Image: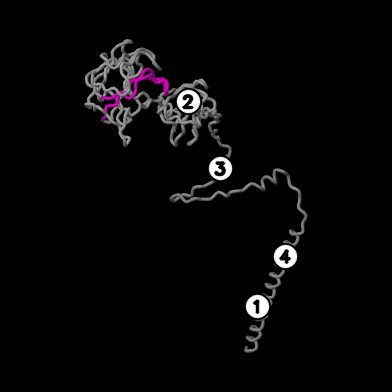
Amino acid sequence: MVNEQRFWHRLSGHLILAGGALILIALGQFQWNTAETELAAATAVPTPVSLAADLLSQTEIVTPTLVPQGSLPVINDDTLAPLPNPHTYQTKPPDHNFQMHEVARGETPNIIAGQYGISADTLLGGNTWLSQESNQLQVGAQLVILPVNGVLHKVRAGETIESIAELYQVPADDIIAYAPNNLEFPFYRLVPETELVIPGASIGQFFFTAPKSVATNAAGEPQWKVFGTGTYIWPVNGRCLTQFYNGFHPAIDVSSSEGSPVYASDTGTVTYASFAAGTYYDYGNLIVLNHGNGFETFYAHLSSIGVFPGQTVTQGELIGFTGNTGRSSGPHIHFEIRDRDFRINPLDRLGGGYQDCS
């Protein structure tokens, strides 16, 4: 019995050893086959493929993924998503070619404008840095000459064609139609910091600055013989207004038949009494009164002048007669009140009613 048990123990041990040997042999055979396959792949000659297969191999294949949505899976497949298109609309900046003018001695705004067939206002429109005081036009200054009457406008961020047109009170179509502005249908996009020509627009006129006094003391201070009352009367008998005060016309125009009397609106000293051709002819025959208190009054387009510089006048005194001289479309008086060179609305200082004849 004991010998029989020993026999079976030895048999089972041999069987286990034989099984392990078979497993090792099988694993060795598998690794050898794998090595042979890799070697064959490395040394194999590439097989030609078709153009379609080549393009397919270069196409990135995206495998759909499942994105959990609550209790149900949702397929998130972006394999058909289009590639971005880099060909977008390119805005063209304005393309201007302006003439330049160097101011010579003795030139006035009108002389310069006449050389180029534009209005004197357009000199201001193309050179916003230029003072509106025509006697500040310095010799040697370089002026931009616009090819048409209008304003050169620098575009600010957020502006549109419509907002610019409203600012200058001109049709938007006129801005678009000016070819060098390069405003293309249908976008009409604006490029900030570029400049557009606004045909037909205006930012104002040149104005004349009269001498502050006709006499000074040893220290150079004005010597005023009289001082104004600080109140003002209408310079003519009529009160029919053909043009009101605004940013482009800081005065009032009062219609009056030619030769009607003009009166001093307040007591003061005559500092200018002449035709304004030496600086700017817009005013025509012009009288300026300095009232000694920081205020001045201007009386323009007169037919004749009845006072002289240095003369003192009292409120209501006759100083001249209405006319149609200078840049004027009919007999009237152009009346300004300036407070330390700042042009204020005369209607804020004049009493009584008036009639709108515009």
Q: How many angstroms separate mark 2 from mark 4 (CA)?
A: 101 Å
Outermost residue toward the front in this view: 218
- Mark 1 vs mark 4: give the one in front: 4
Proximity of marks 1 and 4: CB atoms separated by less than 8 Å: no
Mark 3 highlights which residue? 81
Q: How many angstroms separate mark 3 from mark 1 (CA)?
A: 61 Å
Q: How many angstroms separate mark 4 from mark 3 (CA)?
A: 42 Å
Given residues 167 and 13, the one toward you in this image is: 167
* Residue extent of the magenta highlight: 268-292
- The verdict on residue 178 being magenta is no
On the picture, is 45 further left or further right than 4?
right
Crowding near the residue tagged with mark 3, few <14, some 14–19, many ≥20 C-alpha atoms within 10 Å: few
In percent of width and height, residue 257 lies at: 32, 10
- Mark 3 vs mark 2: give the one in front: 2
- Mark 1 vs mark 2: give the one in front: 2
The residue tagged with tag 3: helix, strand or loop?
loop
Mark 2 highlights which residue? 106
Q: How many angstroms separate mark 1 from mark 4 (CA)?
A: 29 Å
On the picture, is 243 further left or further right than 3?
left
